[in-house]
Image (cartoon, grey):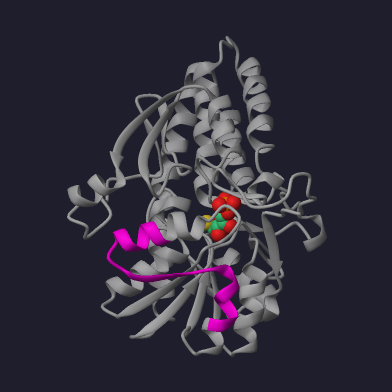
Amino acid sequence: MISYFKYEVRDFFLMNDNSHIDSSLRTVEWKDNKVVMIDQTKLPNQLVFVEYDDFNQVADAIRTLVVRGAPAIGVSGAFGLALAALQSKASTKEELIGDLEKAKKILFETRPTAVNLKWGLEQIMKVANEGNNVNEIKELVVKTAKKMAEEDVQTNMAMGKHGSGLFDDNDTIMTHCNAGALATVAYGTALGVIRATKESGKKIKVIATETRPVQQGSRLTAFELKHDGIDVSLIPDTAVGYTMAKGLVHKVVVGADRILRTGHVFNKIGTYQVALIAKQHGIPFYVAAPLSTFDLQSNPEDVVIEQRNGSEVTGIGDKKTAPDGINVINPAFDMTPPELISGIITEKGIAKAPFGESIKKLFEAN
Ligand code: MRU
């Protein structure tokens, strides 16, 4: 693995005149038969790129949150399999498929909740099985993974267009976690909708929750939006009720890691609380996610919620904030039921209650 320091974020701001995200910047991309990613664990202080030529390194990057966010994980999984294909010494199609199946298992087990990972891996296995020989398969999987990355950006932009009509001039929009450019290849899902609303000429403000324990809200969302010149205020997660009760929030938009056919939404821990408080105050609560985030097979009780290391809760950064030996419960995601959701924005349109029917229609039209 090569890690190369690019800029102090301060320098990066200056380079870009502090007015817009460099549109060529990608969270994850394929370059010269390597996978290049922004190391998100270093943000917001440093913009560091890491370069991988081994699928095991990509698996580690997903596990340790170097790359995170459901769509970004999906594309990273696909790129990981493309690396596995290039690494393979197989001389027959059967041997190569065997190597890819082994790599798929390792990549799949890195994070269990975001369904985009499974989706990305399965897309690659499908084209690999269609190839006739080793060289053709290698070519096909690299081409398909690169295409998936490009399509992710187009999908987010289409989602943004559909979603921007839901927001009005002078709205203040709350978001939780990071469903932005950094959670996708570029542009973002929930933050893509916010970007598209701004691009449509409406004046908007954003309230970003800090999103403990890993602080994707303060480290990533606040960074992205500030960099993009969008008016953003950061709040501790505990101030969601206060800001809503004070009338400071007009609408909420968040991303998703998995959406079931019933409209149950799995997203970053704390999303359920935000949705409940929004309901209490009559504030519309929207979810923005591509069709690749839908899991039409599972029931709510089938979905595995990732439990992360307790050290994320017993400290902030390197600073210990809890007594030694304390028991910790640290689920990474929770489930928001459909009755708290006003609409689900996708690249194909907006699903509304009853979600069973509207989600089915989106897929039938696809
Ligand atoms: O643990 P993370 O940072 O991968 O969790 C990310 C989220 O929960 C996002 O809201 C979700 O993946 C949607 S990203 C477009």
Locate residue 264 relative to residue 228 in the image: left or right.
right
Q: Nearer the viewer, residue 344 or 177?
A: 177
Residue 301: quadrant of the picture: bottom right
User: Residue at position x 66%, y 75% from top?
Assistant: 355
Residue 227: quadrant of the picture: bottom left
User: Residue at position x 54%, y 75% from top?
Assistant: 286
Residue 358 seen in this snapshot: yes
Q: Nearer the viewer, residue 261 or 66?
A: 66
> In the image, which residues are magenta?
222-242
User: Residue at position x 32%, y 62% from top?
Assistant: 226
Give residue 134's position: percent from left, percent from top: 53, 17
User: Residue at position x 50%, y 25% from top?
Assistant: 83
Residue 269: quadrant of the picture: bottom right
Residue 291 seen in this snapshot: no
Q: Quadrant of ligand 1?
A: bottom right
Give residue 179's position: percent from left, percent from top: 49, 59
- Position of residue 174 relative to residue 49, above or below, is below
Does the stretch in magenta take in 258?
Answer: no
Give residue 112's position: percent from left, percent from top: 69, 46
Does the stretch in magenta take in 227?
Answer: yes
Give residue 162's position: percent from left, percent from top: 42, 72
- Position of residue 92 relative to residue 82, above or below, is above
